Amino acid sequence: MAVKKIPDGFHTITPHLVVSDAKGAIEFYKKAFNAEEITRMASPDGKIMHAMIRIGDSFLMLNDEYPDMGAKSPKGIGGTPVTINLYVEDADRVFNQAIKAGAQTDMPLADMFWGDRYGKLKDPYGHHWAIATHIQDLTPDQIQKAAAKFFGN
């Protein structure tokens, strides 16, 4: 049997996060986003060298920091320029669930000019998450006009 070039369940892009406490992060993602743990591999010292969870239909890989190998978390480098966008059926429910699990609000949920109910969170490990539910189909022209109004132009 031929080996599949993209294994079952994977999409073209799979995020891989470095966190300061992978065991804690896995538990947080379970509580915040109903993640399912797929696999966990520990190094001899007990740190997580590789783990994989599933949120919705997508995998997310993560591991503990290994600064000597260049694996640093947002806490280790003082922040992150990356935001992970998470589309869900009910943005309000998931956003509030994540806050209850320990996330902080970066941008409150609101109905946005591009047709999503959208808000941003920072998880306890320094990663940014955008929680969104698509609520309205708009043409590019409608989005452009709504953006101009939003920005006061």
Image: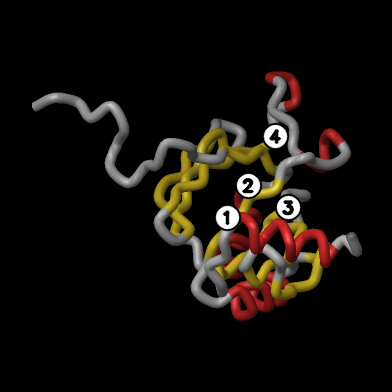
Q: Earlier in the sequence, mark 4 or mark 2?
A: 2
Q: Residues within 10 Å of mark 4 (few under 14, many from 20)?
A: many
Q: CA distance from mark 1 to mark 4?
A: 14 Å
| Quadrant of res 77 | top right
Q: CA distance from mark 4 to mark 3?
A: 17 Å
Q: Earlier in the sequence, mark 3 or mark 2?
A: 2
Q: Quadrant of the C terminus?
A: bottom right
Q: Amino acid at mark 4?
A: Glu
Secondary structure type for disc 1? helix
State whether residue 80 is above or below residue 144: above
Tell me, yes or no, whether the two marked residues, 2 and 1, touch with CB atoms within 8 Å: yes
Residue identified by numbered label 4: 65
Q: CA distance from mark 4 to mark 2?
A: 8 Å
**x and y percentages locating residue 105 in the rendered image:** 81, 67
Residue identified by numbered label 2: 22
Tell me, yes or no, whether the two marked residues, 4 and 2, touch with CB atoms within 8 Å: no
**x and y percentages locating residue 15 in the rendered image:** 55, 40
Task: State the residue lying farthest toward the right.
Answer: 152
Q: Amino acid at mark 3?
A: His
Q: Quadrant of the N terminus?
A: top left
Residue identified by numbered label 3: 128
Of residues 30 and 108, the one drawn nearer to the viewer in this rendering: 108
**x and y percentages locating residue 88 in the rendered image:** 52, 68
Task: Please identify, in this view, whether the residue under mark 1 or under mark 3 is nearer the observer.
Answer: 3
Q: Amino acid at mark 2?
A: Ala
Residue identified by numbered label 1: 26
Secondary structure type for disc 4? loop
State whether residue 124 is above or below residue 137: above
Q: CA distance from mark 2 to mark 1?
A: 6 Å
